[in-house]
Image (tube, rainbow, N blue to C red):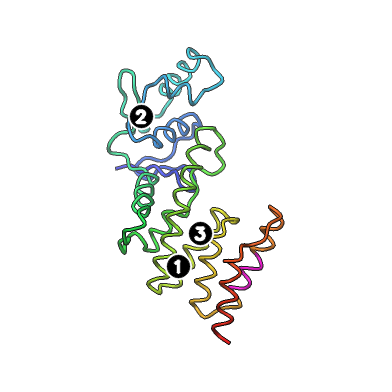
Amino acid sequence: MSHIRLLGGFSLTEPVYAPTSFGSRRLLAYLALKPTAITRASIAGTLWPEANDHRAGLSLRSTLTRMDPAHRLLLDIGPTTLGLSRDVEVDLHSSHRLAVRLLPIDLTPSLSDISISAVAALSEELLPDWYDEWVVAAAEDWRALRMNGLEVQTRELLKRRRLPEAGVAARAAIAVEPLRESAQAALIRVHLAEGNPSEALRVYRRYSVLLDGALGLAPTIALAALIRDHDTSDS
């Protein structure tokens, strides 16, 4: 079974390696984002948006013709549609299912969904350094979904006193959106639970500088209270 990787960059695993042709990579990546086969007209219009329908269709046919036979085996080619073969696994699909499982606030996640490998599965960007409109839109959807998942993982790991792993999840959430206060608060809570208030204060001060520089804002009273209330309880 072949595996297409979209998170952290595009690649194919054994037995088929990534194509050298940029057109082939774009086509495989686009199809890997889709759960089912889609029409050739839709594919051509998306991948070659500046061309008219006829020219876009010719470009798609040219890409298919030039594609290495090993890569064509990854495709499910219909008369008017294209999709990935059922034998192809895509890392985004499994990571997306993980993030969706973490959405319900009334359900306790399974241990496997808050494992360090599960945290890693939500820690990668979708096709970084690809700037096509269809990639940017999909990457933004993925960013929002995994942001929520990482915060849930942090909260659940903290609840279980698995503090080193909670720290990894919190830092991954901050890497997704450094200005998001809930992510910064999660890391502060981890440091306080570790008995490390100086590190919690450092995170708070660094965030204060970042927020002021980016938006001219200060952290909320609630975030400041995390530090203040801890100091009060220790005195």
Secondary structure type for disc 3 = helix
Which residue lies at the image location 61% right of the left edge and 78% below the top edge? 198
Near-viewer residue (216 or 194): 216
In the image, farthest residue toward the front: 221
Which residue lies at the image location 49% right of the left edge and 68% below the top edge? 167
Near-viewer residue (193 or 223): 223
Q: Which residue is mark 2?
A: 72
Mark 2 vs mark 3: which is more N-terminal? 2
Note whether 97 is above or below 219 in the view shown: above
Residue 73 as seen in the image, left or right of residue 28: left
Near-viewer residue (136 or 12): 136
Q: What secondary structure is the magenta-colored segment mainly?
A: helix
Mark 3 vs mark 1: which is more N-terminal? 1
Query: Residue 201 in the image: x percent, y percent?
Result: 62, 73
Query: Residue 71 in the image: x percent, y percent?
Result: 37, 32
Note whether 196 is above or below 84 in the view shown: below
Q: Which residue is mark 1?
A: 166
Mark 2 vs mark 1: which is more N-terminal? 2
Q: Which residue is mark 3?
A: 172
Camera-nearest label, 2 or 1: 1
Residue 123 as seen in the image, left or right of residue 200: left
Q: Which residues are magenta?
A: 200-206
The reply to whether the magenta stretch includes residue 7 is: no
